[in-house]
Image (cartoon, rainbow, N blue to C red):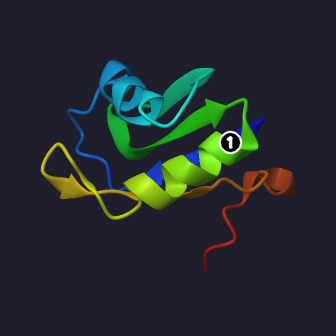
C-alpha cells in the first residue's frame, strides 16, 4: 500500500475528482482531503492510498505537475508523520 501526498489543490477540489484522476492509473483504496480542524475548510492538500506500488508510481509520474481544477498539482509519496505532529518546518 502506497500513501501519496497531493499538494497545491484547488480548495474546491472534491474527493471524487481526485478518485477519478488517480483511478486512470490503478485501484484507489482511499482519498482524504485534509481540512482545518477549526474551520472545516480545505487546506489545499490530500492523501490518496493505492494498494499497488507500481500503479502508485505510475500515478506519481503521470499526475505530478499536471493540472487539476486549474492548478498544477504536486504528487509524491507521503512520508510518515513525525512524533509530536511536527511538520518539520521552521
Which residue matches tag 1?
3
53 above or below 62? above
The quarter holding residue 89 reads bottom right
Where is residue 1 drawn, in percent x and y? Answer: 78, 35
Count of marks overlaid on the render? 1
Q: Nearer the viewer, residue 18 or 23?
A: 23
Q: Nearer the viewer, residue 21 or 47?
A: 21
* Residue 50 seen in the figure: yes
Left-right relation of 28 to 12:
right
Q: Residues within 10 Å of mark 1 (few under 14, many from 20)?
A: many
Left-right relation of 65 to 53:
left
Where is residue 64 drawn, in percent x and y? Answer: 41, 60
The quarter holding residue 20 reads top left
Badge 1 marks a residue whose secondary structure is strand
Q: Residue at x 52, y 55 (%)?
A: 60
The quarter holding residue 52 reads top right
Quarter of the picture containing the C terminus is bottom right
Amino acid at each position: 500500500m502506497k500513501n501519496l501526498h497531493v499538494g497545491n489543490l484547488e480548495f474546491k477540489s472534491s474527493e471524487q475528482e481526485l478518485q477519478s484522476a488517480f483511478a486512470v492509473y490503478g485501484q484507489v483504496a482511499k482519498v482524504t482531503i485534509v481540512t482545518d480542524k477549526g474551520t472545516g475548510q480545505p487546506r489545499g492538500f490530500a492523501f490518496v492510498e493505492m494498494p499497488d506500488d507500481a500503479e502508485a508510481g505510475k500515478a506519481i509520474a503521470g499526475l505530478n505537475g499536471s493540472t487539476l481544477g486549474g492548478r498544477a498539482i504536486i504528487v509524491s509519496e507521503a512520508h510518515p508523520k513525525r512524533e509530536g505532529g511536527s511538520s518539520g518546518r521552521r
